[in-house]
Image (cartoon, rainbow, N blue to C red):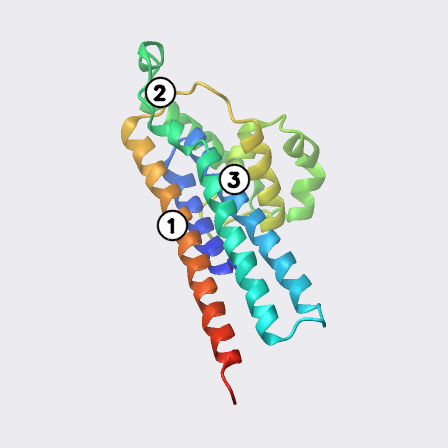
Amino acid sequence: MLKAVISRANYILKDAQQRLPVKSVEVMEKVCLDIETLNDYINQEMGRIAANSKLDAVAKSNARRKVLEEAGRKLEVLKDKSNYSALIETPDKETTKIKEPDEISLLQFMREREIRDRLFGMTEAQILSHFGASLFEGDNQLLLNAILNAPPGFEMLSEHNLRKLRRLRTQKLPLGQAVKPEVAHSATASIIEIFKLAKGELDRLRKNELREAFTAKQPG
């Protein structure tokens, strides 16, 4: 039901992976995974309604609308519980002393690119055969970042495995890292956009169900 939203969210995420620091990307990854989980809930409930032969067209439309309303409430809970707001908190005196020199960022980028160059030409099966254990156990952070930060169109693993790796990296999200204010606002704006897209789509689907139920009640 939220396929278009998820597609757009993944595009926003891939763009963020190219220009934002790891912490900001990890927060965005968590938001995207939450939206996917919400979509799974909606699809499961819609399938259950469609399979219920005891419901007529009007009852099914009303049931679908209730699912969408519940999904809207779940979305608000996700928004409240997400920690993206922490990105724009004013850092304390200790964290302001910690800065990430541009040279470090450049060195990390070069290392990741070198890894991707070495993996180029290998199939997904070969990559998983050689590095799967360390990847999915989170033991090789540099390799994990190199694969997840691959430019759009040059992904080395399937979306299924990339999603698992994003979840793994999110679970290992370190606390207390300082984020530059301009970067934090950029990340926050992207996350807010994802939530707005999801809410807009849920509202559109719910209104469609209202119209469908109204039309079905009209005499033929």
Secondary structure beneath dot 1 equals helix
Q: Position of residue 89 (x, y in %)?
A: 34, 24
Disc 3: which residue: 148
- For image coordinates 34% across by 23% down, the residue present is 103
**Which amino acid, mark 3?**
Leu
Between disc 1 and disc 3, the foreground one is 1
- For image coordinates 39% across by 45% down, the residue present is 15
Disc 2: which residue: 100
Tell me the distance, in whole angstroms, between the alpha carbons under discs 1 and 3: 25 Å
> What number of labels is visible?
3
Q: Position of residue 79 (x, y in %)?
A: 45, 40
Say if 122 sits above or below 136 in the image. below
Secondary structure beneath dot 3 equals helix
Look at the image and tell me whether residue 114 can be seen.
Answer: yes
Residue situated in front as seen by the camera: 128 or 185: 185
Between disc 2 and disc 1, the foreground one is 1
Tell me the distance, in whole angstroms, between the alpha carbons under discs 2 and 1: 32 Å
Q: Quadrant of residue 24?
A: top left
**Which amino acid, mark 1?**
Lys
**Which amino acid, mark 2?**
Glu
Going from N to C along the chain, the mark reached first, 2 or 1, is: 2
Q: Is residue 219 left or right of residue 177?
A: right
Q: Is residue 207 left or right of residue 159?
A: left
Q: Residues within 10 Å of mark 1 (few under 14, many from 20)?
A: few
Q: Residues within 10 Å of mark 2 (few under 14, many from 20)?
A: few
Disc 1: which residue: 196
Secondary structure beneath dot 2 equals loop
Q: Position of residue 58 (x, y in %)?
A: 57, 73
Going from N to C along the chain, the mark reached first, 3 or 2, is: 2
- For image coordinates 37% across by 29% down, the residue present is 87
Going from N to C along the chain, the mark reached first, 1 or 3, is: 3
- For image coordinates 31% across by 10% down, the residue present is 93
